[in-house]
Image (cartoon, coloured by chain):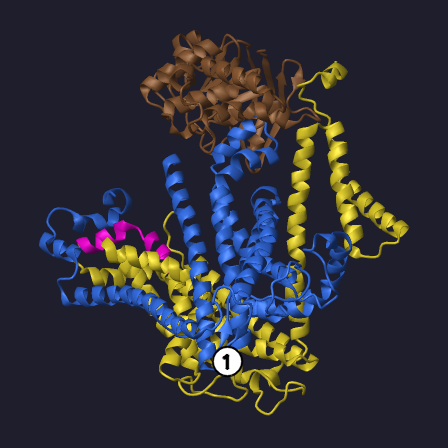
Amino acid sequence: MDITTKNPDTTPPAAPEPPTAEQKRAARGATRPGDRIFLGLSRGSGILLLAVMAAIAIFLTYRAVLAISEDEGNFLTTFEWNTNLNPPSFGIAVLAFGTIVSSIVAMVIAVPVAVAIALFLTHYAPRRLSGPISYVIDLLAAVPSIVYGLWGALILVPNMNGLFGWLNDYLGWTGIFSWEEGAPRSMLTVGILLAIMILPVITNVSREVFRQTPRMNEEAALALGATRWEVVRIAVLPFGRSGVISASMLGLGRALGETMAVATVLSPSFLIQASLLDPGGGTFAQNIAAKFGEANEFGRDALIASGLVLFVITLLVNGAARAIIARRAEYSGANA
Amino acid sequence: MSTVVAEKPGSLQGARLPKWFPYALAGGSVALGIGISFAAGLDSNIQWGLIAAILFIVGTYVIATRVEGKRQAKDRIATSLVWVAFLLAVVPLVSLVWTTVARGVKVLDVYFLTHSMGVVADTETGGGIYHAIIGSLEQVGLATLMGAPIGVLTAIYLVEYGRGKLAKAVTFFVDVMTGIPSIVAGLFILSIMLQFDMEPFGFAGSLALAILMMPVVVRSTEEMLKLVPNELREASLALGIPKWRTILKVVLPTAIGGITTGIMLAVARIAGETAPVLLLVFGNPFINNDPFEGAQASLPLYIYQQYGGGVETSYDRAWAASLTLIAFVMILNLGARGIARWKAPKTGR
Amino acid sequence: MAKRIDVSGLSAYYGSFRAIEDISMTVEPRSVTAFIGPSGCGKSTFLRTLNRMHEVTPGGRVDGKVMLDDENLYGAGVDPVAVRREVGMVFQRPNPFPTMSVYDNVAAGLRLNGSYKKSELSDVVEKSLKGANLWNEVKDRLNKPGSGLSGGQQQRLCIARAIAVEPNVLLMDEPCSALDPISTLAIEDLIGELKERFTIVIVTHNMQQAARVSDRTAFFNLAAVGQPGKLIEIDDTERIFSNPSVQATEDYISGRFG
């Protein structure tokens, strides 16, 4: 960067004479005490962060091993969670199933709606509406999950009866949508609530991606005689695809680890069932919150073991999202 | 002349449906949907809504295809779907805000804010959130005291000094940390407490919250520091000012608005976290001012426990506490955005 | 194919700001008409009013009449989407769709307009790429991304994409300003060939280019910054560059601008 063009006021001292030796020393960094302390502090913080990550991995693994080594059942396939028995028997099969099912339901609902809202904000909404709505969505992303949970349990659940009855009447034969008239505290309700919760996140990221669509590509489509939808289809969506995928993965990461909203809404049980409408099942995070109160030390270790599995799953999902973002960065750089 | 033009394919004068067409069709579809439902004796709201929606979409497609052609018809369908998605999403969000406010104001008053749940059973009226506010403020405050400086310093390291393997590793693990579910952060501290046989106390929650806060602060601070133009640093260094003073006196003041915003948003986020607090702080109906000794309450945890009370009076308290928590989070958010707007570094962007 | 453009009393606005004022001119079919003038004089804005791209800009608005043969582009009930099919456009910076292959880029416009058989589509793509003098360079990598081509090739790809839908008019907004001299020459040669089939309007900052490629030249100017741009004169290119009838034109052409 050329200093002279941008900061004419500060150039005189930068010109030939000033103490070049000092300048070099300053640039090299830690030679004076002040520099050394400051570098030490900031580098120390970075190292501390790494140490915390290492500690998380080590402690979780250690306590998890303590629990799993005592497990009478198979940790991966057992359909129960009895840590107070002697010998104890517990497994994550139901939790893994429930976590994945509820997250899939959430994604199936949230992703198309979020993409549509992002398109609405960037390409369809009247200009005057778009700004305030984006702002409101930003704020909604900040609503604490426990509030969503309270709303889900007290407002959403009673309002699901109609939908559940209707689904059972017409789609009950599939098995997935059969319902035995229990309270609608089921995986489908959880999935819908999770969808509402991750909607702002996916919308925000997708909106930013769509907004970055090169103006000239949209104009190229327009100049070929494309309608608005065709502009979206041939210029906006292909450009934003990887961004939408990574946004969805971030949303998925949230849905997988969400605790309170699931804990308040779901009526849990330790079984795997095909129906999304009948109450039952559980998720990793929900199970931890629900079982923690009554667990003894060994029970807590078992919960830590299940948390470790959740940790690994979210790491993989987030890693995939980052990889996609990174690839996209290279790709768009090549086209800049 | 004009008739010939209108019929010639590829002419500019495509037939257009009038502006009121979508509204008229929407009205017609709803009316017909309700009519059919009545006639068939269906009573669910979802049914007539669905019938109306299908009528509208099929109607749009058929009529627009005939009058305007297939491409325009698809365009119209896409437009209506996008609008429907937006309206569909508005319903739950409006409902959430509306219920929280409407039911929250019922018991939210000065008494509620200044009393604890000490001798109040879930089924009784009265009681308040004073103890929870104290707990939340102390836990979040301590978490911020730990998380914010470490986060900012790490970001300074990454932007101002960071080259080489260590910086790469830190960047990578900050990304990893961003994705940690809050309950896992709670379990981590829990595993330490189990190791050393400790009872729940407020500061344990602070530690978990700090872990959740750090990566957020690092990311936002990094962004802000990168916005500070290099010319400023070079100009200062060229004056013979040591690097640490350059960072402290030139770089940080320039970016301070954005950094503050990032920290406030991070505080807003951890203030609403329930899961780690549930595991580590445990909850306590009495006032406990000491975050280092004994179980404490916190606002999100209070909401969860009042929901668990399972009766109207405890639900009312849960809503009122939700309203308080949302208000706190929103004030932080709005304040952060305000600061971001006023103190934004004036770098042509 | 090629059609005549007849503009009368045309003004264009950005919000309340009037960018060009009361322009009238005729563009002959099967010829190249160049627009020259200082920056900000509204020549690009005017070009974009000729296929209704101006109104895509927020606040963009147009008064007046643009007749394409005997149809007014701004007449009641005219569909801007249909207009843009008739009047193609090439932009200042090459803008192939980054996610599409060379082939798909050229086929993009055709695919929008419905059902083509695969063989038909391939024929049109080949014809258009040949028409844009690009076929020999890309025939072995039709399925590679269009963004992998050089700048000059990308611009010719954009020209191929524009002519694939067989428009009546081709608008070019400084098509060579982002290219090196050799690529510029290739495009200029191409323009000379394309005018056999299309009515071509080109905006350029380069007066030698206007002299080289165009049959007629229009000079635009503005009284001062913040004032609307106006058409000063339009005439055969030879006359404009040798013996213009307005003093301002001569000043601009000879570099005595101001």
Q: How crowded is mark 1: few (under 14 residues within 10 Å), some or many (20 or more)?
A: some
Query: Residue A68 sits in which quadrant?
Result: bottom left
Chain shown yellow: that is B
* Magenta highlight: main SS: helix
- Frontmost residue, A316 versus C16: A316
Q: Position of residue A130 (x, y in %)?
A: 58, 49
Considering only vertical position in the picture, is C95 above or below A304? above
Query: Residue A145 sits in which quadrant?
Result: bottom right
Chain shown blue: that is A
**Given the image, on which type of amino acid does mark 1 rest?**
Ala
Q: Colour of chain C?
A: brown
Q: Quadrant of the N terminus of chain A?
A: top left
From this viewpoint, which residue is outermost toward the right? B39
Magenta segment: B219-238
Question: Disc 1 designates what residue?
Answer: A295
**Which residue is at a point 68% across and 77% down the rendered structure image?**
B106
**Which residue is at a point 71% across and 16% down the rendered structure image?**
B8
* Residue C254 is one of the magenta-drawn residues: no
Q: Where is residue C215 in the image (x, y as percent from the top left)?
A: 46, 9
Is residue B162 in sight in this rendering?
no
